[in-house]
Amino acid sequence: MKAIEKSRRWYENILLPELKKHFPEELCRMAVGVAGRGSECFGFDDEVSGDHDNLTGVSIWLTDEDERTFGLALGRLYREVHRRSFPEKGHKSQLGFAEHGVDTVSGFFRRHLGISGAPESCRQWLDIPEYALAEAVNGEIFADGPGIFSAIREKIMYGMPEDVRLKKIAGHLVMMAQSGQYNFERCLKHGETAAAEIALGEFVRHAVSLAFLLNFRFAPYYKWMFRGMRQLPQLGFAAEKLAALLVEKQNIQPRLTLIEEIASDFIRVIQEQNLSNAAGNYLEPHAFAVLRGIGDQQLRAMHIMDF
């Protein structure tokens, strides 16, 4: 059983009765769930995940005002109930345990995004890393009386302006062209094999991020990029091709062929979404075609690699 389901059962069977008993009036003011950093928040936890922290637990998110009013007492109750439930478990990682317990809505988003809610401007959308946006909307919400926390998550999940998505898509495309289709082979010709491997890694990293954007999702932290990409309805199959570039020790020509095959996979989806009318398999013309489709003049005028 995944940790998120264990956490739901613990909340419903153990913690919720205690909350009803000790905070009957305040219960409707709480949002409860699992979200943020950690494999369990993405549903990616496995037998290895339990070696550093007890993954079973929930966050209780309050408004700033409610946290000042009853947050301290609520936190004491949470810790006591959790300690009784899992007396044998320690928490070696401060970061791993940071997502459990009493928190504020604003504190959660400030910790992940650097701002207290959803991005409001195109510049904020561009500046916040995609993995941070993924952490802000993952997991599950078990209860949300006020609805504030869920509303912010919805705005992040579905509120990225299309022009910002296009700007990011164009940037990832041009970086894939530069690193994989151009500089990888040139570095090898220069005898710079280490630089060639870096170029290949850049190609893969930008390709994975692009795959998520083409699915209207955010790529998680690099540790979980491939596991997440395999689950994507579009281009999920390309995860294995990208992994092969990194882990299979092939000769140069098969890798160059695979890079072009991957480029073709991405171009097909970009054209299916009517984002590019460029021709050929080189990704750079498609990047500039996507850029030209941006309606916001300021975004369109930015350097294509500023994303």
Image (cartoon, rainbow, N blue to C red):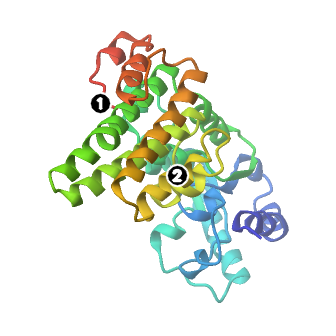
Between marks 2 and 1, how big is the CA–CA gap? 27 Å
Give the position of the N terminus as an image quadrant.
Answer: bottom right
Q: In the image as oriented, which residue stretches furthest toward the left?
A: 190
Left or right: 256, with 53 as reference point: left
Left or right: 66, with 8 as reference point: left
Q: Is residue 213 above or below residue 291?
A: below
Left or right: 196, with 67 as reference point: left
Left or right: 259, with 18 as reference point: left
Q: Secondary structure at mark 2?
A: helix
Residue drawn where x is 67% and y is 68% of the image: 57
Q: Which circle's residue, 2 or 1, is located before the other in the chain?
A: 2
CB contact under 8 Å: marks 2 and 1? no
- Please give the label number shown on residue 306: 1
Q: Could you tell me residue 296's position as x and y percent?
A: 41, 12
Q: Is residue 193 above or below residue 296?
A: below
Q: Which residue is mark 2?
A: 241
- Amino acid found under the numbered disc labelled 1: Asp
Give the position of the C terminus as an image quadrant.
Answer: top left
